[in-house]
Image (spheres, helix red, strand yellow):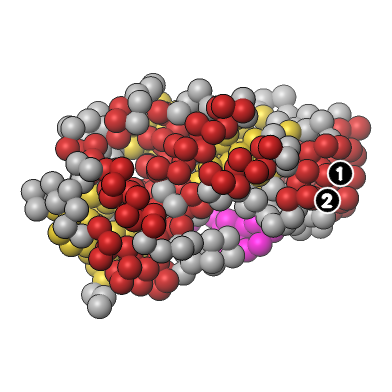
Amino acid sequence: MKITEIEFGKLKMPLKTPFKTALRTIDCMEDVVIILHTDTGQRGFGSAPATALITGETHGSIIEAIRTVIMPAIVGEDVANLNRVVHLLQQSIVGNFSAKAAVEIALYDLFAQSFNAPLYRILGGGEPVISTDLTISVDYIDKMVKDALDAVARGFDALKIKVGKDLTLDIERVKAVYAAVGDKALIRLDANQGWTPKQTVSALRQLEEAGVELECIEQPVRGDDIEGMKYVTERVSTLVMADESSFGPREVIDLIRMRGADIINIKLMKTGGISNAVKIADIAAIYGVECMIGCMAETSIGVSAAAHVAVAKSTTITRIDLDSPSLAKVNPVIGGVTFDDAEIRISDAPGLGIESISELSMLKVG
Ligand code: MG
């Protein structure tokens, strides 16, 4: 099965409600979708969102990196030699992790299709049903409490509360949500780099003293402030998770060895795809560190790939944050993985199992 050509499309999905973090507010998700063609007629699907503030990539940069650098490096290669093709892909360009991820997702889709098996089985198997948390956007306290109560009523037993806007108000937000649903759901905080190390220690101590039991605090300080992550990790009993501080396997080794985090948040768009996500899970397992698997605000193609990785690496990936498809008004992807509120279920279909994508507008590039 040789790689012949690629097609690009765009997929835009309005959200049920705006998604608000300390960094940004969005009301729709928009992905670059790629379709990787082969000489056998089989097609692999991949996707990537633009996250300029996190990976530095835009739709334009993703398309150009794939079209002018990554594709020329892998065209004509046989998908059967997956490791070789992944190596060529990863070596073809520095950075550009989401562009690499989109192509790797399509490659792994094709590789699993060639064995007529769902991707998670090719990655080592597992129970194809997982349970995701739900993100509660940063907002007025009453709105956050209402959203948290609604989420628990819909069956979510873990909530990720977005904070990081204003420290004093953030503490009140968390106390209010915890008072409303703390006995029914695990509460994770994600400050999206919004606090300083000292603010984080102060906030967590205040919350700990108020009896608020948090499952973990995600990326409280700037991603490049590894000393700050270490400072926080050493001083609070709440588990600290690295998100923007951790991209590829090398950063994960450094973070774990210097004890800059207790948990690693793996996202395919940061790792550059499935190969490095698997490596990170294996590295974390060596050190006895647990991982979360997360996603960007993105549609269900890339998130489906993440779900396959989560199932196959479930002994290390113990926390699932793949709620982005359920934040969209509809799921445009038919086949493969179903997202039903907290429950994510993978079918027996080969590869990612994608049959069709509605609302996909194909792009003419080049
Ligand atoms: Mg995060």
Which quarter of the picture shows residue 264?
top right
Residue 20 lies, in percent from the top left, at 63, 57
Within-10-Å neighbours for mark 1: few <14, some 14–19, many 20+: many
The disc at residue 108 is none
Q: How many marks?
A: 2
Residue at 25% in and 58% down: 74
Asked whether 267 falls inside the magenta stretch, the response is no
Q: CA distance from mark 2 to mark 1?
A: 6 Å
Q: Is residue 5 left or right of residue 92?
A: left
- Of residues 74 and 270, the one drawn nearer to the viewer in this rendering: 74
Residue type, numbered disc 1: Val
Q: Which residue is mark 2?
A: 197
| Residue 285, placed above or below residue 79 | above
Residue at 18% in and 62% down: 5
Q: Is residue 53 left or right of residue 298?
A: right
Give the farthest residue toward the left. Answer: 40
Q: Is residue 75 left or right of residue 251?
A: left
- Of residues 12 and 248, the one drawn nearer to the viewer in this rendering: 248
Q: Which residue is mark 1?
A: 201
Residue at 40% in and 28% down: 312
Residue 154 lies, in percent from the top left, at 53, 33
Asked whether 20 falls inside the magenta stretch, the response is yes
- Magenta residues span 15-28
Residue 179 lies, in percent from the top left, at 78, 33
- Which quadrant of the rendered structure holds the C terminus? bottom left
Q: Main secondary structure of the magenta part?
A: strand
- Of residues 100 and 140, the one drawn nearer to the viewer in this rendering: 100
Which quarter of the picture shows residue 242?
top right
| Residue 192, placed above or below residue 259 | below
- Of residues 297 and 6, the one drawn nearer to the viewer in this rendering: 6
Element at badge 1? helix
Residue 138 shows in this picture = no
